[in-house]
Image (tube, rainbow, N blue to C red):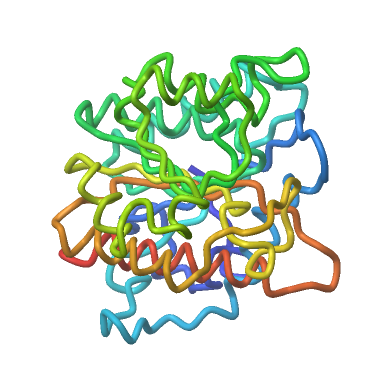
């Protein structure tokens, strides 16, 4: 598979550590944008995240390692979605990720709109049939259709629930949903940790523990950056107030490792870069690198 050179790959690391064959980790840019419903710009996100990643330090003080050199991180050329939409676009992603997983790569998919996430989730489920999905998001995304499409970003988890038991979807940070979605969550026993409930202490003082206790051994993470409060990530198409903060999110992610959960892959979606505002993409790039350090903390 063709990879990006050091001038444009994740972390801007030299070829010795970003060669595909020698890299355990693969970054897959999927700049898909077709059915956004408010602000636009998610197609630019992978490129901007990769550019910002050049300013992320290699050394992680928490794990005392430079995982990019220990494991290798290859960045593939972005998927070309020309004239490919909805199911056709998702099939391209599925095929690519299937090939990567068959080569024992740890795959990070960079969207693009949240629609793309059903594809990597589908392929990871083939390899890890016991897995659950940990969804960080402001929106439930359980509408059966939105704006006359089943492939809307607002319907992505409804599509996932067609092949993954809904009880194995764990949502964190939700604070915007319609009654249809609320009914789906209740009737299908989706484990949803609402932002309001977290703030009010409904899940106890240690809500992160409650989330982790809901997870199976193998955890796939789908991370819509509008999960964060807009003060953390203002650059997203559908920002919602009263979101979660960066440090409390890392506390939850660290707890996954403490409780012997295994992060098997993840995607990052819905960043919509704002011109001359650099920190949202830098924050996202740092989040990706921290997730990788956590995923390989015991390897």
Residue 124 in picture, x, y percent from top left: 33, 32
Quadrant in which the C terminus is drawn: bottom left
Q: Nearer the viewer, residue 228 or 54?
A: 228
What is the number of callouts on the image? 0
Q: Nearer the viewer, residue 71 or 41?
A: 41
With 203 as the anchor, is 261 left or right in this view?
Answer: left
Q: Nearer the viewer, residue 32 or 160?
A: 160
Image height of 200 relative to 13, above or below: above
Quarter of the image where one finds residue 243: bottom right
Image height of 264 relative to 167, above or below: below
Task: Decide if residue 29 is in sight here.
Answer: no
Q: In percent of the image, x 41 and y 47: which residue is there?
A: 266
Residue 61 in picture, x, y percent from top left: 33, 86
Task: Decide if residue 116 is in sight here.
Answer: yes
Residue 290 in picture, x, y percent from top left: 40, 69
Q: In percent of the image, x 21 and y 61: which residue is there?
A: 257
With 162 as the anchor, is 53 left or right in this view?
Answer: right
Quarter of the image where one finds residue 113: top right
Image height of 293 relative to 55, above or below: above
Residue 272 in picture, x, y percent from top left: 74, 53
Q: In percent of the image, x 72 and y 53: which residue is there?
A: 236
With 259 as the anchor, is 296 left or right in this view?
Answer: right
With 24 as the anchor, is 76 left or right in this view?
Answer: right
Q: In percent of the image, x 47 and y 19: which residue is there?
A: 184
């Amino acid at each position: 598979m063709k990879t990006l050179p050091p001038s444009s790959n994740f972390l801007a690391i030299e070829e010795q550590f970003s060669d595909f064959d020698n890299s355990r980790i693969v970054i897959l840019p999927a700049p898909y944008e077709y059915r956004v419903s408010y602000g636009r710009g998610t197609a630019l996100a992978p490129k901007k995240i990769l550019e910002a990643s050049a300013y992320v330090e290699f050394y992680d003080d928490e794990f005392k390692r430079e995982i990019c050199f220990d494991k290798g991180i290859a960045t593939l050329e972005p998927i070309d979605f020309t004239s490919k939409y909805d199911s056709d676009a998702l099939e391209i992603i599925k095929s690519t990720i299937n090939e990567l997983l068959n080569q024992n790569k740890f795959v990070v998919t960079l969207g693009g709109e949240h629609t793309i996430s059903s594809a990597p989730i589908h392929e990871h489920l083939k390899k890890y049939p016991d897995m659950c999905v940990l969804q960080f998001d402001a929106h439930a995304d359980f509408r059966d259709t939105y704006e006359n499409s089943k492939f809307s970003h607002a319907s992505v988890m409804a599509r996932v629930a067609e092949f993954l038991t809904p009880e194995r979807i764990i949502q964190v940070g939700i604070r915007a949903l319609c009654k249809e979605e609320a009914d789906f969550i209740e009737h299908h026993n989706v484990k949803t940790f609402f932002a309001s409930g977290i703030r009010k202490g409904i899940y106890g003082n240690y809500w992160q523990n409650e989330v982790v206790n809901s997870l199976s051994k193998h955890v796939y993470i789908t991370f819509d950056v509008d999960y964060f409060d807009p003060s953390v990530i203002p650059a997203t198409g559908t920002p919602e107030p009263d979101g979660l903060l960066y440090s409390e999110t890392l506390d939850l992610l660290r707890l996954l490792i403490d409780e012997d959960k295994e992060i098997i892959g993840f995607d990052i979606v819905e960043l919509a870069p704002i011109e001359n505002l650099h920190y949202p993409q830098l924050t996202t790039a740092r989040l990706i690198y921290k997730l990788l350090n956590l995923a390989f903390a015991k390897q």
